[in-house]
Amino acid sequence: MHVIITGGSSGIGAAVAELEAARDGRISMIARRENLLTHQRARLLARFPRAMVHICAADVTDATALTAAIESCEARHGPCDRLVTAAGIVEPGELISQSPASFRTQIDCNLFGTVHAVRAVYPSMVQRQSGQIVIISSGAGLIGIHGYSAYCASKHALTGFAEALRQEAKPNGIAVSICFPPDTDTPQLAAELPLRSPAASAIMGMARSRPAERVARAIVKGADRGRFEIYPGLEMALLGRFGTLIAPLLRWHFDRKIAASGTPSGD
């Protein structure tokens, strides 16, 4: 099986790549920084010498460059059997103080970066009447979070995209999955935490972060079983299954936490 992973150089994407390499699979990793990809490839081959690992540097927001990268991956390892869209970015900030450029960057990377990757592999999958698309969203795709308007917008959008894509893809023999990870121990989380507002920390401090390896195991397991919705951990499963029912209670609870944090509007 040929697995193509965007955002494969670190975090959840790298952890998924490791699990696939352990199965001696054909793996292609795409990310912006070639040095990180090179390091990740060497690490995987040292541990799993029978795996076939290809890397290609590209920015997922650049549709032309990403399509060329995926074509390179397919030329090396054959048609994509499973696409995992793990590339993403988060820049916390209240709407009143966040720059339009920052807001747009998150939409471009998280939403359009996923769409570009799917478009690149989808025609071949339709022609072959087989394939799988695994979209990595976030717990922020299930509920709004103070100071994350851009990020939540991009991740909520992925839910609608995945729902519609599933209906289009199923008659063509293509499976679609979407995963909603909680806070995950990654370099991105480490960079994100200092930028969180006290209000966001008060809300999100209620949930524990998970190791990237545990999240990746849930993703691969769910994808192997053909699940549409993948929830790593009980909290995400409850939020995904019952979020609409408990939303009024959560909003009330979050409003109290935000008020107690003493965060002035615009900070």
Image (spheres, rainbow, N blue to C red):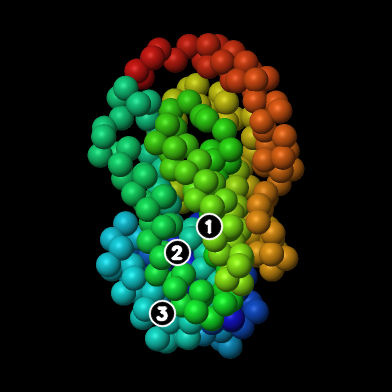
Mark 1 and 3 residues: CB-CB less than 8 Å, in contact?
Answer: no
Q: Distance between the residues labelled 1 and 2?
A: 10 Å
Residue 243 or 185: which is nearer the viewer?
Answer: 243
Residue 242 or 151: which is nearer the viewer?
Answer: 242
Residue 65, position in %: x, y? 28, 68
N-term-proximal mark, 2 vs 3 = 3
Residue 205, position in %: x, y? 59, 30
- Quadrant assignment for the C terminus: top left
Give the residue drawn at x 61%, y 65%. 170
- State the residue position of label 1: 165
- Element type at marker 2? helix
Residue 48, position in %: x, y? 59, 81
Q: Which of marks 1 and 2 is in front?
A: 1
N-term-proximal mark, 1 vs 2 = 2
Q: Distance between the residues labelled 1 and 3?
A: 23 Å
- State the residue position of label 2: 118
163 left or right, relative to 99:
right
| Residue type at numbered disc 1 | Leu
Mark 1 and 2 residues: CB-CB less than 8 Å, in contact?
Answer: yes
- Element type at marker 3? helix
N-term-proximal mark, 1 vs 3 = 3
Q: Residues within 10 Å of mark 3 (few under 14, many from 20)?
A: many
223 left or right, relative to 151:
right
- State the residue position of label 3: 73
Give the residue drawn at x 30%, y 41%. 104
- Element type at marker 1? helix
Give the residue drawn at x 34%, y 49%. 108
Residue 198, position in %: x, y? 48, 22
| Residue type at numbered disc 2 | Val
Figure quadrant of residue 76: bottom left
Residue 167 or 76: which is nearer the viewer?
Answer: 167
Q: Nearer the viewer, mark 2 or mark 3?
A: 2
